[in-house]
Image: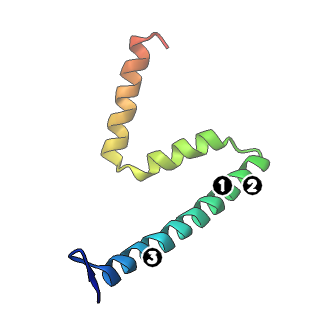
Amino acid sequence: MADVGGIAADRLRSFIERVERLEEEKAALAADIREVYSEAKGAGFDVKIMRQLIRLRKLDHADRQEQEEILEVYKRALDM
């Protein structure tokens, strides 16, 4: 392992290459996700609402319930 300026070059290169591979995988996954949304849209589903549902499903029940309650309070405050 060659040290350049106090940096282990081989180890640094390994980290950089791993991140680059993961970025490529992330881009491929993002393309796959876009394709699924496109397919859902073609089937008549509202993609914007689907994205909201996915975001909500990531929350635990208590957090989701709290957000919904706050949203209702805000909507009432704005006479919506």
- Relative to 58, say whether 72 is above or below: above
* Residue beneath disc 1: 34
Tag count: 3
Q: Which mark is residue 39?
A: 2
Give yes or no for contact between labels 3 and 1 (Cβ–Cβ under 8 Å).
no
Amino acid residing under circle 2: Glu
Observer-nearest residue: 6 or 61? 6
First in sequence, mark 2 or 1: give its number.
Answer: 1
Q: Secondary structure at mark 1?
A: helix
What residue appears at the point 40 percent right and 26 percent down from the top-left corner? 71
- Relative to 38, say whether 70 is above or below: above
Q: CA distance from mark 2 to mark 1?
A: 9 Å
**Position of the N terminus by quadrant:** bottom left
First in sequence, mark 2 or 3: give its number.
Answer: 3
Q: Position of residue 68 (x, y in %)?
A: 40, 33
**Name of the residue lying farthest toward the top:** 79
Q: Within 10 angstroms of label 1, few (less than 14), some, or many (20 or more) residues?
A: few
- Relative to 19, say whether 3 is above or below: below
Amino acid residing under circle 1: Arg
**Left or right: residue 80 compared with residue 77:** right
Q: CA distance from mark 3 to mark 1?
A: 26 Å
What residue appears at the point 61 percent right and 66 percent down from the top-left corner? 28
Tell us which disc is closer to us: 3 or 1: 3
Q: CA distance from mark 2 to mark 3?
A: 33 Å
What residue appears at the point 67 percent right and 52 percent down from the top-left corner? 37
First in sequence, mark 3 or 1: give its number.
Answer: 3
Q: Position of residue 14 (x, y in %)?
A: 38, 80
Q: Which mark is residue 17?
A: 3
What residue appears at the point 50 percent right and 66 percent down from the top-left corner? 23
Amino acid residing under circle 3: Glu
